Image: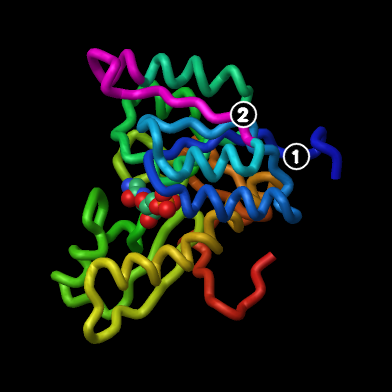
Amino acid sequence: MSDNHKLPLVALISGGGTNLQAIIDGAVGDLPVEIRAVISNRPDVLGLTRAENAGIPTRVLNHKTFPDRESYDQALIELIDEYQPGLVVLAGFMRILTPGFVRHYAGRMFNIHPSLLPKFRGLHTHQQALDEGETLHGASVHFVTEELDGGPLIVQAQVPVRDGDDAGTLANRVLQREHLIYPLAIRWFAQQRLHLAGNGQVYLDNQPLQQPVLFTPGQEIV
Ligand code: GAR
């Protein structure tokens, strides 16, 4: 497939970038995307090195050099739009976004969140799941809307909570699933099989999703 038929994508990161790595690996394979840039709000994070190693342009827009959230997000829009992405993916981008930023990318921005939303929005999701005595935990990919971690869900993956788990062991188990479901959702979008209607309804293959697709290991979802 030539680059003309690939979805132009910009990824935003704040840290280690294992989800970014999964997307890079997919793009090296048969994921029909062209990662045009990786942008981090933090300098010197491993995710930037991952992008550089893959030959992807990297940019740092340090939030600490801006007086407020509005001016940062405006500068971020200008930076992202230099690359004219068809999809913006938040891959461990640990910033609360302004409504104007979210509206600018309405229907073309994804986030991945380490919980079975709507459970456990925000931070420390694994500890929250342990504290609540959950036996199932997981991750969700969703369209980004103005509601923090509240946008329409696309796909989820579940993992068991095991005796003796701590937040770290649970996070690792969830991450393994994140690395599968994020490229999957991106693939559907790149193939123009997935879209968000103006009323907030997600459509996959022209069917309204009544609930997120549940990814099950071993089950082939194409
Ligand atoms: C991932 O677990 C992702 O779901 C989470 O941050 C981690 C980033 O890991 N995102 C959020 O919590 C967003 N609210 P990575 O940098 O290795 O992809």
Q: What element carries label 2?
A: loop
User: Which residue shows up at 28% across the image and 67% down it?
Assistant: 168
| Screen quadrant of the C terminus | bottom right
Q: Residue furthest right?
A: 2
Q: How crowded is mark 1: few (under 14 residues within 10 Å), some or many (20 or more)?
A: some
Q: Where is residue 47 in the image (x, y as percent from the top left)?
A: 47, 43
Question: Which label number is shown at residue 6?
Answer: 1
* Residue 19 painted magenta: no
Q: Which span is picked out in magenta?
A: 56-72
Q: Where is residue 176 in the image (x, y as percent from the top left)?
A: 47, 67
Of 197 and 163, nearer the camera is 163
Q: Look at the picture and state if 15 lies above or below 44.
A: below
Mark closer to the chain start, 1 or 2 = 1
Q: Is mark 1 on a helix, strand or loop?
A: loop
User: Which residue shows up at 57% across the image and 55% down it?
Assistant: 22
Give the labeled residue for mark 2. Answer: 85
* Residue 63 painted magenta: yes
Q: Which amino acid does label 2 sit on?
A: Pro
User: Which residue shows up at 80% across the image and 36% down it?
Assistant: 3
Q: What residue type is labelled 1?
A: Lys
**Visual colour scheme:** rainbow
Q: In this view, does 132 lie to the left or right of 171?
A: left
